[in-house]
Amino acid sequence: MPKSKGRKKAVVHQIPRAKEIEVESPKWYVVTMTGLMVVGVLAVLAYYIFSLSPWSLRGGLLAIAIGFIMTVNWH
């Protein structure tokens, strides 16, 4: 019985990847992000401890939310 020569496999050319550049966030970004979250927690605590207006609770929660949103872009 004759032998089958088989099919030739397709040649796959891989494109070499460029080196990824590591980009770090500036120091002020980290300080701002952390500061917003700390000030937000303090504002929420002040609302409950000292019975302040509801605006301090809203402002504290907003500061915490903005701080957490900033963590998405932090490298």
Image (cartoon, grey):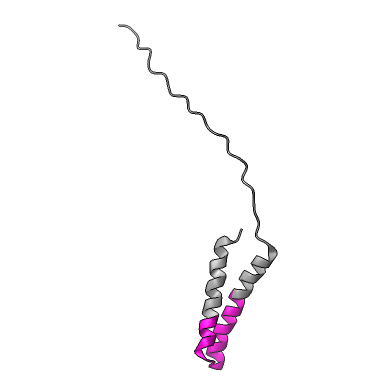
Residue at 64% over, 48% down: 21
Furthest-right residue in this view: 27
- Which residue is depicted at the point 52% across and 79% down? 61
- State left or right for residue 25 relative to residue 64: right
On the image, the x and y values in percent for residue 47 come to 54, 88
Q: Residue furthest top?
A: 1
Residue 8 higher or lower than 29, as above or below = above
Q: Residue furthest left?
A: 1
Residue 49 lies left or right of residue 25; in this view the side is: left
8 vs 70: above or below: above
Which residue shows up at 55% across the image and 75% down it? Answer: 64
Q: Quadrant of the N terminus?
A: top left
Where 13 sits versus 69, above or below? above
Residue drawn where x is 38% and y is 12% of the image:
5
Q: Is residue 70 magenta?
A: no
Q: Position of residue 31 (x, y in %)?
A: 66, 69
What x and y, as percent, mark residue 35? 63, 74
Q: Nearer the viewer, residue 6 or 17?
A: 17
Q: Nearer the viewer, residue 60 or 42?
A: 60
Count of numbered marks: 0
Q: Quadrant of the C terminus?
A: bottom right
The magenta span reads 37-59
Residue 60 image position (x, y, % from top left): 55, 81
Q: Magenta region, mostly helix, strand or loop?
A: helix
- For residue 54: magenta? yes
Displayed quadrant of residue 7: top left
In this view of the protein, which residue sits in the foreground, 45 or 33?
33
